[in-house]
Image (spheres, rainbow, N blue to C red):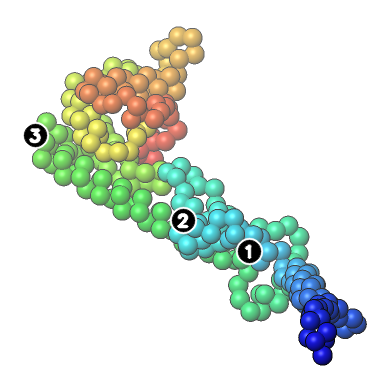
Amino acid sequence: MSDDSQRPIVFKRVKKTLHGGHHGGAWKIAYADFVTAMMAFFLLMWLLTSVNKAKLEGISNYFKTPLKVALMGGPAGSKSNMLPNQGEGILKQPGKSSQDGKGGDGDKKDKGKGEAPSELDAQTAQMIEAARTRAEKRQLQNLKEQIDAAIAVIPALAGFKDLIKTELTTDGLRLQILDDKNRPSFDLGSGEMKPHTSAILREMASLLNKVPNRISLSGHTDATPYAGGTGGYSNWELSADRANAARRVLVAGGIEQDKILRVVGLGSAVPFDTENP
């Protein structure tokens, strides 16, 4: 008994190893990602074949310039939303599509649901052009009223108000200095300006400086052939000399030279009195 109680006690550690079974569910996550990617790919291919070209361009332009869509209230690539400048604006002609050729079945379906993008662009262009025309007409009408009022108030011009005519035309506001039987602007066949005409233009120079518009000067003659000239001098040269004489007087009166856009001679091509040119 004593020998058994003195024997050492040994503890043996046994390492357990699992055999068999599977590798867990990680493969399911990878497979689900693959199926999702394939579904998204086929959905994209279906959208590309079912949506027409105009809508695809609109979507593309939106992601390129989304801020412009928010500010302008239309497709980002639409040129008709851009405000034109003071000159002749380049706008789309109404009724013309932005695409060449005939649309496919997708275009026909879209027309049944709503207006095509080209029609909307044409309508927008028409509204912008109409608004610009109305604004310019109001501005010119206000300018005409200001000039008429100034002519009536300025003492140097009040005596010649019957010789000064203002009217709105398709080209803008026309201001004419007319001839009177007793007070012609120029002598017959001469490019030298009369003193009263020069006085009118000098006063008009300070008045025209106050408006933002640029001016065009044109000279005229009657239909009487110019027979006293040399070297082919005719009514065309005479009218150009008269227009240039008006330019010199305006510059001497203080008008800014960059406000004068052009100086032309019209000869007798545009008579004031068609019955007695």
The residue where tag 2 is placed is 129
Q: Secondary structure at mark 2?
A: helix
Residue type for callout 2: Glu
Quarter of the picture containing the C terminus is top left
Q: Secondary structure at mark 1?
A: helix
> Which residue is at 20% across, 30% downward?
206
Q: In the depicted view, which residue is nearer to us: 92 or 44?
A: 44
- Earlier along the polypeptide chain: callout 2 or callout 3? 2
Residue type for callout 1: Ile
Residue 155 is labelled as: 3
Height in image: 39 above or below 98? below
Residue 59 is labelled as: 1
Classify residue 153 by image quadrant.
Answer: top left
- Earlier along the polypeptide chain: callout 3 or callout 1? 1
For the residues marked 2 and 3, what is the alpha-carbon distance in whole angstroms? Answer: 41 Å
Q: Nearer the viewer, mark 2 or mark 3?
A: 2
